[in-house]
Each structure stands twice: as structure tokens, then as C-alpha cells.
Image (spheres, helix red, strand yellow):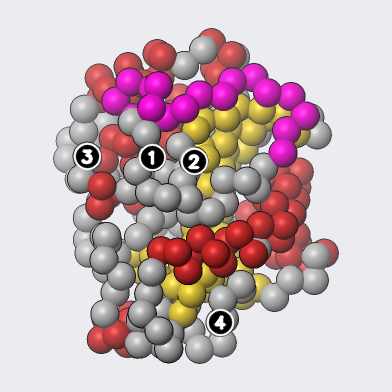
Amino acid sequence: MDLKLFDRMADFLPDVCFERPPDVAIVLGSGWADALSADRTFARIPYADIPGLGAATVVGHTGEFWLYERAGRRVAAFCGRRHWYEGVGWETVVFPVELLRRMGGTKLLLTNAAGGINPALKPGDFVILKDHINTVGINPLIGPVVEGWGPRFPDMTEVYTKHLRDVLHGAANRRGLRVMEGIYAFTSGPVFETPAEIRAYGHIGADVVGMSTVPEAVFARACGIQVAGLSLVSNLAAGISPRPLCHEEVLAATKTAQGVMSGLVEDFILDC
């Protein structure tokens, strides 16, 4: 990766971003961008203005960095993400995590919209990630060892921190929500999976599937950052769904669940 590009990205941001570590950072996936509310805003910057980052290219990803305060907690929010399948390298994918590391933050919530594999799931359900399966093997840590990014072979026994999983469970229970802990299968995209692939992922233990989250989680955990992952089941996966898959279905599901998503994120910010 181009470390000088990270320097240029970080140098562009105002000094307020580095005056104190955020209490928590959030990366918002497809359709999650409206799940935030602020008492005070310190910075709000479109991705397109940050050198080397570039605008989000996927519908449902706002593409904006937002540093704000909520109930006395400082939050660094990345409204939308860049994906490996966009073809512009790892720098844009992991920049939110690298920026959090440079800001001194230690807690990260990753959200996404995912396809349901486990037959117990239905659209609108939430899954708290307890582990993941990287089905394609690509990894942002491939390359030279970089100081601050952990050892050559980082331990991934507990990528998703139990304490933060418990915080999400508490938030869901207070709101009477149906949640389960599950395993996320990461695919590179940008195609939806085939029915045969979904059957295979189910056989090896995956509950949900998607095209994001795992690279950021791996990178963050290697850097010593505590990670939580939360998926909204936006659709049933290929071969399980009775109809062809499309991104519009994903966005419709997230729009329907917007109020619940906001509540979960709000509780996580206050309780983590």
C-alpha cells in the first residue's frame, strides 16, 4: 500500500480531528448513512474532497466523514465505505481504520447489509458478528510489515470483541429486537453469489454473506482496535430467495429498518 497516500489523506483533515481520540468510530454500510444524530459537529467532509480517497461509487453509500459529539461522546463516522471490488486498491478500503488509528481511537463498529444464509433468518433481522470466513483470501495486510499495523502474523482468534458484542445484545434486548450472533462470509464482489456458493458457505458455517467488513475488521484487529460487526439481513441469499437478487432490494430493506438501525447505533455509541 502507498503509505504516503495515507499521509496526504490525514494531512488534509482539520486539526480538530486529532485534538483528542474519538470514543468510538463507525463505518456505515449500504443504507445505514441516516442512522446518526449529533449534538455538535466538529467536521463534515465529503470523501471526494479528501485527496486519494474519492467519492463513494455505490448507491446507498453517502461518502462523507463526520466528526461529531453525541451525549458527550466523540464519534468519528464514515458514512459509506469504499470496496475492494471498486478496483482502486486497499488504501481507500482501510483508510477509515488507519485514520482511527492515527486519531488514537480504540473502538470500531462496522455495519453492513448482508444476504441471509441461515434458514432461521429473514429480511429485517439483525446479526451480531461473532466471526467471519474470508472466502477469497485477499487481505489488506499482504505486503511489507508496517509499524503500528501489528505483527507479521496477527492473531485473529477474537476479531469481534466479546464486550462490544454484549453491548449490541444489550441494545437489541432493550428494544425488543430479534437478533442472533452469526458468522459472516466475505466475498470479493461485485457479483452476487451463486446458489452453489451459498450452499457451500452454509455448509462451512456462514450465517450471512456480503462484500465488505472483513478487510476493515482484520486490519483493525491487527492494529489493536476493538471491533464490533452488525449486519442487517436485507435479503435472502441466492438459491434461498425466490427471486433474482438486486441492489434495489437491499436499499429498500435498509430504508424500512432505518428507525431500528438508528436506535441500535445510538445505544452502541452511548454504552460501548
Of circles 4 and 1, which is in front? 1
Residue that badge 3 annotates = 88
Residue that badge 1 annotates = 56
- Looking at the image, is 161 positioned above or below residue 173? above
Instruction: Name the N-terminal-most of marks 3 and 2.
Output: 2
Picture residue at 26% right of the left edge, 31% below the top: 146
Magenta span contains residue 252? no
Instruction: Please state the horizontal and vertical placement of residue 272, each as a whole percent of the image.
Output: 70, 46
Instruction: Name the N-terminal-most of marks 4 and 1.
Output: 1
Q: Disc 1 to disc 2, how far (Cα)?
A: 7 Å
Asked whether 192 or 73 is in front, the reply is: 192
**Are the two marked residues, 3 and 1, in contact with CB atoms closer than 8 angstroms?**
no
| Part of the protein shown in magenta | 37-53
Residue that badge 4 annotates = 121
What amino acid does circle 4 point to? Answer: Leu
Instruction: Please state the horizontal and vertical placement of residue 10, each as a whole percent of the image.
Output: 40, 19
As helix, strand or loop, the secondary structure at mark 3 comes to: loop
Quadrant the N terminus occupies: top left
Residue 223 seen: no
Residue that badge 2 annotates = 62
Instruction: Name the N-terminal-most of marks 4 and 2.
Output: 2
Q: Quadrant of residue 9?
A: top left
Magenta span contains residue 38? yes
What amino acid does circle 1 point to? Answer: Ala
Tell me the tag on residue 69. Answer: none
Picture residue at 28% right of the left edge, 35% below the top: 91
Q: Is residue 2 left or right of residue 184?
A: left
Instruction: Name the N-terminal-most of marks 3 and 4.
Output: 3
Of circles 3 and 2, which is in front? 2
**Are the two marked residues, 3 and 4, in contact with CB atoms closer than 8 angstroms?**
no
What amino acid does circle 3 point to? Answer: Val
